Amino acid sequence: MEKLILDAKTVEAVNAGFANTFGSNPERYFSAPGRTEIGGNHTDHQRGRVLAAAVNLEAVAAVRANGTDQIRILSEGYPMCQVSLADLEPNTAEYNTTPALIRGVAARFAQMGCKVEGFDAYVTSTVLPGSGLSSSAAYEVLIGTIINHMFFDGKVSQPEIAMIGQYAENVFFGKPCGLMDQMASAVGNMVTIDFFDKENPVIESVDFDFAACGHALCIIDSRASHADLTDEYAAITIELKNICSFFGKDVLTQIDEAEFIANMAALREKFGDRAVLRAYHFYKENARVPQQVAALREGNFDKFLGLVKQSGYSSWMYLQNVIPAGYTTHQDVALSLALCENYLNGRGAYRVHGGGFAGTVQAFVPVDILETFRAGIDAVLGEGACHVLSIRPHGGVEAYA
C-alpha cells in the first residue's frame, strides 16, 4: 500500500499547534481513521461477526520524543493530557477520561516488553466526538500506532494494536466495549471480522466500491446526546449475559441457536421478553453478516441493500436500541430513520448505526437524489447533519508531510 501523505493544510495546522504548545517542531506524524459499522449491530461483544470499514475522517498527530517519562498530548479544543510512565496502573478515579486511555495503551505496551518513553503530541481530528464514527477508537489506535513505531520498531501488528485499544478501554477507561471499532480503525479498508476466537479474530478484506453502484455512503447525525445513556448501553450486554448464564456460557456464539429457541419459554420467564428478543436479534444479525459479504463479493448490490434494511428492522424491533426506555419527547434516532425512509422513498437502504439510542443513522443513498436527501435531512436536524463519506484504505499508520 502507498504511504499516507497528509494534505498541506493538515500539516500546517498540526505543525503550528505543536510549535505553539511545545515550543519546537515535530519529528513524525501519525494518523488513525474513524470507522463505520456496515453489518453486525451489537454482535462484537458476543464474539460474533461484523462488517466494518475505515472512513475518510481521521485523527492526526504531530509527535516528538521529549526525553522524559511523561506523555503530553494536546488535542485541539481540549485541555492538555499528561500521563506519567512511572504509574501505569488502572485508577477508578480516572475512569471515562482521556488520560485513562493513554495510560492503558502505554501500560499494555510495557507489559509486552516495550520500553515506552515520553513524547509530546499535538492532535487534530475530523472524527467528531459523538458522531457514531468512533472517535475514541481512532484515538486509541493513534496512541498505539505512535508508541509502536517510535519505541517498539513496529513489532506489533495492526490487529494487536486494536486489541491494545480495547484493553485500555475495558480496564483503564471502565467501558466494557467490544473490538469492532478499534479493529476497523486499526486495519483500514472494508473488512469482515469473526471474533469467535477472541485471541485470534479472523479478518478478511472486502473490496467493494459503493460509488460504482451509484450510491453514496451517508452518516446522519441525529444530534442526540449520549449523556445519561450509559445504563441503556450496559443493559444490552447485561441482559445477553443473563441469557448466556442460563446455559453456563459466556457469550451467545457458544450457544447453538436451536438450543436458544428450544428454551425460549423458560428464558422469557426467568429474564423477561426484552432480553430474549435481544438475543434473537443477535442470532439473526450474526447470520446476516456473511450474507452481506457474499452479496458484495458477488456484485449483487440489491441483495446487499435488502440485508441492510433487514438489519435496521431487527435493531429497532428486537435489539431495541433506537428509543431509550421511557423517552417520549426526544426520539431523535427514530425521527432520523423516518426522514431517511421519506427521502429514500423505497430506494437505497438505511439503519441505526453503532451503539444506538443516540448518535447516528447510516444510509446508502442513490447519487441522483443525494442533494435532495441531504437537504431534507439538514432542514430538520440542522445544517451539516448528513455526512457523505468514503472508505479509507489505510488504518492506523505513520503518515508523511
Image (tube, grey):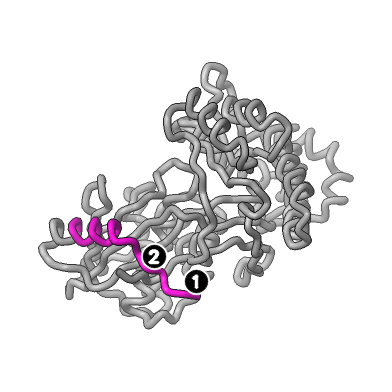
Asked whether, in this view, residue 335 is left or right of residue 40, the answer is left
Q: Secondary structure at mark 1?
A: helix
What x and y, as percent, mark residue 50? 65, 56
The reply, left or right, for residue 230 in relation to residue 107 is right
User: Mark on residue 105?
Assistant: 2
Which region shows up in magenta? 1-17
Q: Quadrant of residue 242?
A: top right
**Does 257 sit above or below residue 376?**
below
- Tell me the residue at 73%/58% (across/down): 296
Residue 287 can be seen in this image: yes
Placement of 243 over or under 198, stated as above or below: above
- Amino acid type assigned to the residue bearing label 1 in the image: Gln
Instruction: Give the numbered dot on residue 19.
Output: none
Q: CA distance from mark 1 to mark 2?
A: 14 Å
Asked if residue 375 is among those painted magenta in the image, a careful observer would answer: no
Q: Nearer the viewer, mark 1 or mark 2?
A: 1
Q: Amino acid at mark 2?
A: Val
Q: Nearer the viewer, residue 366 or 72?
A: 366
Whether 124 is drawn above or below 28: the answer is: above
Residue shown at 41% from the left, 56% from the top? 58
- Read off the residue under disc 1: 158
- Look at 43% across and 57% down and name the residue there: 138
Looking at the image, tell me whether mark 1 or mark 2 is earlier in sequence order. Answer: 2
Residue 269 position in % (x across, y down)? 79, 33
Assess whether residue 11 is covered by the magenta stretch. Answer: yes
